[in-house]
Amino acid sequence: MFEFVKVSPHKPWLDKIFHANKGRYATYYAPSLSDGIPTSSMQSNSRNWVRQRNVLELYKRLSGNYNSGNALLQSIQNRCMRLSEFDWIHDDECRAWWMAVLHNEQVVDIGIMLGFTPSEHKLGAMQLIFSNGMKGWFKPCGLSDEYPENEVVASAFDFVMGFQRSPPALIRNITVDTLRQVIWKKGVYSPFNSKSAIIEQTARICSSKGIFSGAIIGWWTGLKDGKSLPKTMKYWDKYMPGIDVRETRMKLPDIVNAEEVHIHLMLYLLNILRIPGKNEFVFTLPAREGDPARQIFVGVDLDRANLTIKAPAVVPTLCLGCVMGNHTFEILKKAAFSSTALMNELRYFWRELGGFNLPPAKELSGRIERAYDCMNDCINLYKAENVIIPDEIWVS
């Protein structure tokens, strides 16, 4: 292969990513993180997550025999290809199939490549195009607070909790030569080909022994920029000074409130609390079976998820807005009454989908408890019928 020029105007940024990437092993893969608990016993004994376990088992069956001769795989694919990504995350077979595609489908092209631009905080993510026409967003690099593994942490959390707002994500190993050959087949592989240069740059910074180990996230078509009310008091006071949170919420339609609060709760528990409009994406769900078209918020670009630090104690959406869909409240209540079992279940899914171990996150349990207490305080103050939006109006 060509020896690409190593001098770059972004060298300090590249050096920072290079050194940070070395920390992924100690953060996620060190044997001591497993606490000596074998995979088989990391699952909880709770019946709360039977559905999620069944999806995981189907994924492993499909992934273990991923070929055109697998009649079950082909049957599921033929059905799911006619549906939207929103349907895929709600349909158990489609979700398992989507995960299997991400883990196994042959890469035939590379689309968008972000490269490494410090002013735009680019970390080398790229769009992989598969032989079946689907796409995945591949993140082989990261910084200490934006590691690729966090995408798996967040996606599995979304699924296990039942929010159903994020595409699946898992860790996939891809050789550097595989991506070189993909570009080679599409044109000339040379230092003057921007994709070639980015691959070589990424290989030097983020590969190990000729292999990229990164998060592959399901590509969700049709997303548009969205914007919701501020998620923290800091941003509320900055963007909506002097305006009452509860009064503002009460002016919005129930279906809008329920959707916003649903994604806000998920992001609060993941501790991704950015300014309004930053990394907020919406998908328009077409009208169906008598239900009007509506916008849903989709959780993507979740590598800032952090379950190990304390989140703000007062959250305007939960503690002051005092409105939530019943389906969301039931998710929160289930988590509040089974936090230990939930953590075991999460650790099991992280190991199965990411191959890594994380210690129990006590801070997550604290956030769940705080959110649940806030909603109960709201119910005591305003009465349940003025706080909880019934399922007839909105479900996730």
Image (cartoon, helix red, strand yellow):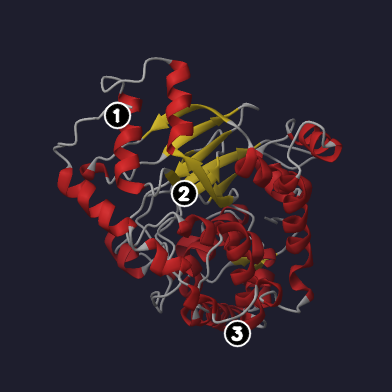
361, above or below 221, in the image: below
190, above or below 155, in the image: above
How far is mark 2 from mark 1, CA to CA? 19 Å
Residue 257: x and y, percent?
Answer: 56, 58
The image quadrant of residue 27 is bottom left
Tag 2, which secondary structure? strand
Describe residue 118's horizontal placement relative to residue 93 as left or right.
Answer: left
Residue 358: x and y, percent?
Answer: 50, 72
The residue that appears at 50% across and 41% down in the rendered structure is 174
Depth check, front residue: 161 or 248: 161
Is disc 1 surrounded by few (<14), some (14 to 19) or many (20+) residues within 10 Å? many
Q: Earlier in the sequence, mark 1 or mark 3?
A: 1
Q: Amino acid at mark 3?
A: Asn
Q: Name the front one of labels 2 and 3.
A: 2
> Mark 3 = which residue?
380
Residue 363 seen from this side? yes
> Mark 1 = which residue?
197
Residue 109: x and y, percent?
Answer: 50, 25
Q: Which mark is residue 214?
A: 2
Q: Which mark is residue 132?
A: none
Q: Amino acid at mark 1?
A: Ala
Tag 3, which secondary structure? helix
Q: Earlier in the sequence, mark 2 or mark 3?
A: 2
Q: Earlier in the sequence, mark 2 or mark 1?
A: 1
Dots 1 and 3: beta carbons under 8 Å?
Answer: no
